[in-house]
Image (cartoon, rainbow, N blue to C red):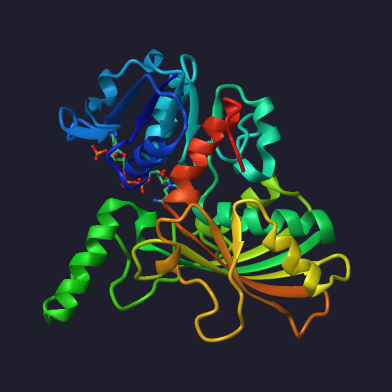
Amino acid sequence: MNFAIIGATGNVGRKIIEVLEKSDLEINNLHLVASKKSAGKKLKFRNKEIVIEQLEKYDFSNSEITIFAAGSEIAEKWVPEASKKTIVIDNSKYFRMDKDVPLVVAEVNAEDLKKHKNIIANPNCSTIQLMLALKPLHDKFTIKRVIVSTYQAVSGAGKDPLDELFSQTRDYLDDKKINSKNFTKQIAFNLIPHIDSFVEDGYTKEEWKMENETKKILDNNIKLSATCVRVPIKTSHSESVNIEFEKDYDLALVKKILANAPGCKVVDEHNDGGYVTPLEAEGSNLTFISRIRKDNSNKRAINIWVVSDNLLKGAALNSVQIAECLLGKFKV
Ligand code: NAP
């Protein structure tokens, strides 16, 4: 197989290279594509140096599978043309709610890939990790409503915002003037309850994405309300999740189901340090579930804490796993 990555120099693109490097996929040629600014530079893949190509000059028929990680505007402009020549797996939000485009989490709804017409969308990072925890619980107890608050890492916004976190942190400690270019307010030593743009009802598009993507992937009947917050850490998104079921549940069975959830690991010791933090999740392919407990205000609800590396399962890993599903190589 030949693969291509559009946006290969970005946070997600570079992670896709790492994930492909470790995967069992047989890759004859990997094409790395980015903007004019990066064209001609080199990146390493399996001990070979690959020259980065410029998107405008790239021939999409070079590869059977092309993973886009270059944002919505690039996806809107280039994916329709690319999909005439290659299967596209797109990381941007642009095609996610298109009814002809499957929105897939490998462990959750890979069967939706059967309907693809050469474009497949990777869900939003904060949605993917939530789906891994919700799916097996929904299968058993039928989820009625979810209330989620996110604590999202700065790497989720891209490489320029991440550089801004580093420089602001340095400037803050050196007592220098803080400049904010990529965020609406200072992100270092702060947090910002605003990700993506606002929509009319006061929610943000990031919150809207969680609600709508959950309905598309899992079940249109699930009600979900989200508050998405950017926090000043590098990698891994965390989520505080309240889940209300249609049916009465048994907490021991909830724990057993989560312990067996594909792609997940439960770390839940209810004592000092018996939970997973974003730093510990960084670099892991797993989604971690901690703080599993009854909601004492609602007998049909539970609370959990879900943490996952946003660049891995939240983006690069799931994109590569979609490719593995297409090729019949995905192993849970
Ligand atoms: P990023 O770090 O800012 O990288 C953007 C990439 O797109 C770079 O490779 C850049 O190339 C390329 N690019 C930008 N403008 C281009 C142009 N005009 N022509 C060709 N290439 C161009 O962004 P990211 O965080 O990797 O995100 C990429 C996509 O994945 C976005 O749609 C994002 O929403 C989505 N996503 C991200 C995450 C996450 O956790 N980061 C999770 C899920 C989904 P140059 O280096 O040459 O400019």
Q: Is residue 317 above or below residue 183?
A: above
Q: Position of residue 201 (x, y in %)?
A: 59, 62
Q: Is residue 116 left or right of residue 141?
A: left
The answer to whether 322 is drawn above or below residue 302 in the figure is: above
Is residue 323 left or right of 41 when viewed as pictured?
A: right
**Do we see residue 222 in this rendering?**
no
Q: Nearer the viewer, residue 62 or 268?
A: 268
Quarter assignment of residue 331 = top right
Instruction: Say which residue appears at 35% left-offset and 37% top-offset.
Output: 17
160 versus 300 height, above or below:
above
Taking the image as shown, residue 199 lies to the left or right of residue 257, namely: left
Nearer the observer, 255 or 191: 255
Q: Does residue 67 appear left or right of residue 32 in this picture?
A: right
Evaluate whether residue 247 shows in this view.
Answer: yes
Seen at 70% across and 57% down, the residue is 260
Q: Percent position (x, y) of residue 262?
A: 65, 51
